[in-house]
Image: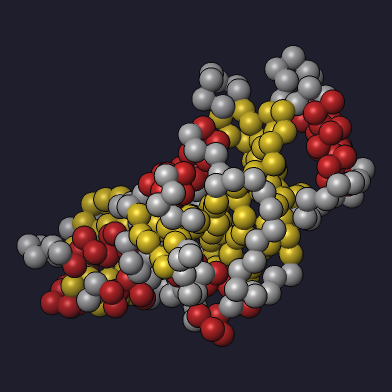
Amino acid sequence: MEVKVGYLGPAGSFTEQAAKAIFANEKRVPFRTIPDCIDAVNDHLVDYAVVPLENAIEGSVNITLDYLIHHQRMTMTAEVTAPIYQHLMVRKEHVSVWKEAATVFSHPQAIAQCHHFLRNNLPDATITYSVSTAEAAKHVSEQLDGVFAAIANEIAAKEYGLEIVQSEINDYDNNSTRFIVLKKGVMGEETFSGLDHSTYKTTLMVTLPSDFSGALHQVLSAFAWRKLNLSKIESRPMKTGLGNYFFIIDVEMKMDKVLLAGACEEIKALGCGVDILGSYPCFEWKALEAENGALK
């Protein structure tokens, strides 16, 4: 049976390359938005979805988290962390006049990652957001009237016949993104074509009782005394009113029946809600790039 993998497209996006790193031999299907990718899994159009979850510079991709929590709950089943290199590109006939670009197109995260470059080099250009960096490159390739630029990767430039006029324009060198693999159904063992991984992560969603002072402190204590390392804790609005939040917590271990299970039960005993969003292998791009190349 053919396995289909949805990703934030179109072809040439960073997300496609992350999907290719894990699903090298499966059929990859592009979707226009992150919610479209997630809905495709729910509607059985694809078996998995690969979407961006967090950027080292700009933080969480909020649309991914919020759509998962509030609209279409899925199981996190793997992640790959990849270095991100942003480039400025234009149509070939505009290489010599790229500084005259009236508009720069890209995904909001990419624009934010290149804020200083844009401010210093294209201060008068209008910034227009696209649903992905590849969509921005595709759009610029189709514009025949006027000078326009896109921020995207090398693969998108090649895919849509654009020329890179400024390379690696992201403001910080340590730019990287976590991409998450989502599936429908219960958490379970996944195999990914024999790929090696060194670490596991378990992601929890915790909601606090509104009338319990010090609840967050006690939640964190449940992990601390068991010596469970948290790599991330983040609050997101419940969308039920100001001051109402849930917490996303990443624990650096695989879900077990003793330590992490015990922590979850202790947290529930405090009156908190606990949902396990996934327990999954974590892949690093440097371990895969010999086969797949860098995300440039």
Q: Residue shown at 87%/40% (left/top)?
A: 262
Q: Residue shown at 69%/36% (left/top)?
A: 275
Query: Which residue is situated farthest in the top direction here?
Result: 211
Say which quadrant the C terminus sits in: bottom left
Q: Residue shown at 68%/28% (left/top)?
A: 207
| Vertical position of residue 28 compared to residue 95: above or below | above
Q: Position of residue 257 (x, y in %)?
A: 86, 47
Give the side of residue 159 with respect to residue 68, left or right: left
Of 68 and 252, which appears nearest the observer?
Answer: 68
Query: Which residue is situated farthest in the bottom direction here?
Result: 290
The way the protein has been coloured in the rendering is: secondary structure
Q: Position of residue 225 (x, y in %)?
A: 92, 43
Q: Residue shown at 49%/38% (left/top)?
A: 72
Count of residue discs: 0
Of 145 and 228, which appears nearest the observer?
Answer: 228
Residue 150 visible somewhere in the drawing: no
Q: Position of residue 144 (x, y in %)?
A: 9, 65
| Vertical position of residue 51 compared to residue 196: above or below | above
Quadrant for residue 161, please give it. Answer: bottom left
Of 25 and 80, which appears nearest the observer?
Answer: 25
Quadrant for residue 236, please give it. Answer: top right
Give the side of residue 118 with respect to residue 146, left or right: right
